[in-house]
Image (cartoon, rainbow, N blue to C red):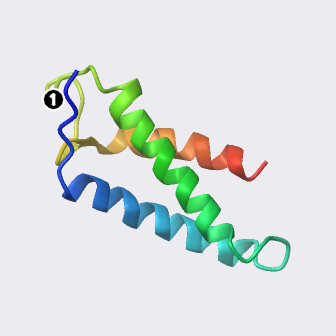
């Protein structure tokens, strides 16, 4: 298996993860730690990267869309959502 991530795909995932972390921090401001944005963002990034490269990594570009510089965007967001929701339980 060959991993072919460029810079744009992970950069997109980092941006989405940071935005998720900041929104979670804003929602749970009074009842959570000050570093909730970092915990949530890290969980979202690692779950998205795992989903894109491990779970759906063997599929080809024709079978899975859209691909952003080697990152399966929709699948990474799906995997990130499940991992981030576990970090808040």
- Which residue is the extreme one toward the right? 31
In what element is the residue under mark 1? loop
- In percent of the image, x 59 and y 40: which residue is there? 82
Residue 12 lies, in percent from the top left, at: 31, 60
Q: Quadrant of residue 35?
A: bottom right
- Mark 1, residue position: 61
Q: Residue at x 71, y 73 (%)?
A: 27
> Which residue sits at x=25%, y=53%?
9
Left or right of 42, for residue 53 = left
For image coordinates 17% across by 38% down, the residue present is 4
Above-or-below relation of 2 to 13: above
On screen, residue 25 versus residue 65, left or right, reads right
Q: In the figure, 78 relative to 11: above or below?
A: above
Q: Position of residue 57 (x, y in %)?
A: 30, 26
Residue 49: image location, x then y, percent: 40, 43
Image side of residue 11 versus residue 23, left or right: left
Q: Residues within 10 Å of mark 1 (few under 14, many from 20)?
A: few
How many labels sit on residues?
A: 1
What quarter of the picture does the N terminus occupy? top left
State whether residue 10 is above or below residue 76: below
Q: Is residue 34 above or below residue 14?
A: below
Outermost residue, front side: 2
Q: Position of residue 64 (x, y in %)?
A: 24, 29
């Amino acid at each position: 298996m060959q991993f072919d991530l460029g810079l744009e795909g992970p950069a997109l995932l980092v941006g989405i993860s940071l935005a998720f972390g900041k929104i979670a921090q804003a929602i749970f401001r009074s009842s959570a730690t000050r570093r909730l944005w970092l915990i949530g963002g890290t969980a979202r990034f690692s779950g998205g990267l795992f989903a894109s490269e491990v779970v759906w990594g063997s599929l080809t570009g024709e079978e899975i869309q859209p691909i952003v510089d080697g990152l399966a965007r929709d699948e990474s967001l799906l995997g990130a959502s499940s991992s981030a929701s576990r970090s808040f339980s």
